[in-house]
Image (spheres, rainbow, N blue to C red):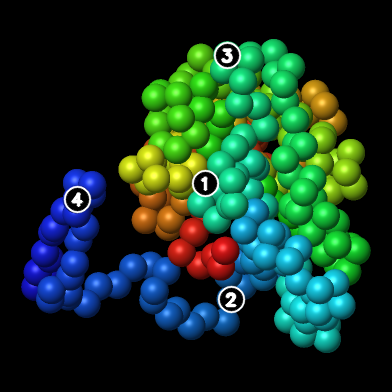
Amino acid sequence: MTVTKYTTNNKFVLKSEPVFPSGTETGAAKHIITEGIVCDSFNGFGVALTGASCYNLMQMEKEERQKLLKYIYTEEGLNLSVARIPVGSCDYSAEIYTYDDVPNDTELKHFSIERDRAYILPMIKEIISIKPDLKLFASPWSPPGWMKTGGSICGGVMRQKYIKTYAEYIIKFIKAYKAEGINISVITPQNEPEVDQWGMFPACKWHPEHEVEYVLTLSKRLKEENLDVDIWFYDHNFDGWRRVDWCLTEYPEIKNAARRLRGITTAGQSK
């Protein structure tokens, strides 16, 4: 039996509180012992390099920071080999912005990563100097607000008419970072595409068919630009597998567009 209490605060945000939770099991929670190979590749372990973490690292004395980073990224310590970086700001950022916040700039004339130069780019570069083979995958928390319903970076739904423009936006991001010596190995379409977080921080909902259309569009542009970047599909929790299954069944061509289809759970990430 499960008993849950629901309350609202003064901002009318609904909050659930388990009073008598029942035991549940999910596929990810079960321990299955097998002698067979469960996967043929493993990229490694890593953490997210958010705006907030880069900012805090920047405040440290360089000697102490180097000591910490070497412990995290070398064999002297954890030897992490993967890092996730946001495309623009995220829920753990010191500022809220995207790389083109000029309304209706469909030609992306005002695209710029300038705001990343203060502490994000320097920290990523410093980490790469310690771990040159670090695998970076990038996730957007939100497209520019003018591409979404409501016009805000925080919350809203991606509008279909801007899908091609947004694909160009991501291409520009990958190229801009590459020009800084930072190579993005993987891009995900959207961090948690099924929630808008009540408009409290950068987030965006995507209709499944619009996400498929975007993946197909971006895949084509990556090939045209000769950019060796994988697309990891559906950057959300494992319990969204039905959505992924429907997309793969309804649009089998996406299997070729997203060369490495993955369901990436945010529950296991440390930001």
Q: Earlier in the sequence, mark 4 or mark 2?
A: 4
4 and 1 marks in contact (CB < 8 Å): no
Q: Position of residue 36 (x, y in %)?
A: 58, 76
Tell me whether circle 3 and circle 2 mark residues in contact (CB < 8 Å): no
Name the amino acid, label 4.
Answer: Asn
Work out which residue is located at the far bottom of the displayed protein and give it. 76
Q: Is residue 163 visible?
A: yes
Residue identifier under label 1: 191
Q: Please, what secondary structure does the residue beneath circle 3 have?
A: loop
Name which residue lies at 56% across and 21% down: 163
Please give the residue where the numbered disc 4 appears in the rendered image: 10
Q: Residues within 10 Å of mark 1 (few under 14, many from 20)?
A: many
- Foreground mark, 4 or 1, reads 4
Spatial distance from mark 3 to mark 4, Cα to Cα? 35 Å
The residue depicted at 48 percent of the width and 83 percent of the height is 33
The N terminus, quarter of image: bottom left
Amino acid type, label 3: Asn
- Judge left or right: residue 60 versus residue 4: right
Q: Are marks 1 and 2 in contact (CB under 8 Å)?
A: no
